[in-house]
Amino acid sequence: MKRYCLILDLRPDAGLIQEYVDWHKAVWPEIKQSIRDAGVLDMQIYLLENRLFMIMDTGDGFTFERKAEMDRANPRVLEWEQLMSRYQDVKPGCDPVKRWRLMDKVFELGAA
């Protein structure tokens, strides 16, 4: 199993942030299935002010490139990503399947 941690900022608007949270209380079933189909075993998203923090646990065969290819070929995922772009603080024209930024691990208690 692999673990990835990613961040993404939302627009600093309390109303938009709440809408984003509300959408994630009822994520479309097709979106959940596409995440699982890409090899993601578990995913959690946390919020602090307007910053999102995602933890993804994946199978060993998972790659971001394969997931991006699958997402680009899935009209429902593209529709979801277009909808979510309203809330995300990213540059116009940013690739909708590459908005989350991968974080580098700097410490692990169990590793020492």
Image (tube, helix red, strand yellow):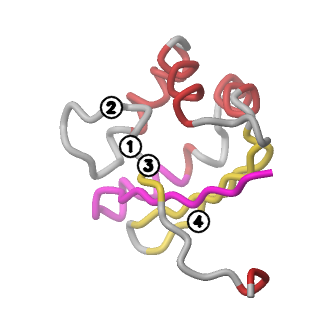
The answer for how far apart the CA atoms under marks 4 and 2 are is 22 Å
Q: Which residue is mark 1?
A: 99
Q: Which numbered mark, 4 or 2, is in the foreground of this view?
A: 2
Q: Are marks 3 and 1 in contact (CB under 8 Å)?
A: yes
Relative to 51, say whether 84 is above or below. Answer: above
User: What residue is pinned by disc 2?
Assistant: 95
Pointers 3 and 2 in contact (C-beta within 8 Å)? no
User: Mark 3 and mark 1: span between their CA atoms?
Assistant: 4 Å
Of label 3 and label 2, which has the lower sequence position?
2
| Secondary structure under the numbered disc 4 in the rendered image | strand
Quarter where residue 50 is shown: bottom left
- Give the alpha-carbon distance from disc 1 to disc 2, as whole Å: 6 Å
Q: Mark 2 or mark 4, which is nearer the start of the sequence? A: 4
Contact between labelled residues 2 and 1, with CB atoms less than 8 Å apart = yes
In the displayed structure, 91 sits above or below 93; it is: below
Magenta segment: 1-21
Magenta-drawn stretch contains 33: no
Task: Tell me: 29 left or right of 14.
Answer: right
Residue 5 lies in magenta, yes or no? Answer: yes
The amino acid at mark 4 is: Tyr
Q: Is residue 92 left or right of residue 62?
A: left
Disc 3 target residue: 100
Write down the residue under mark 4: 46
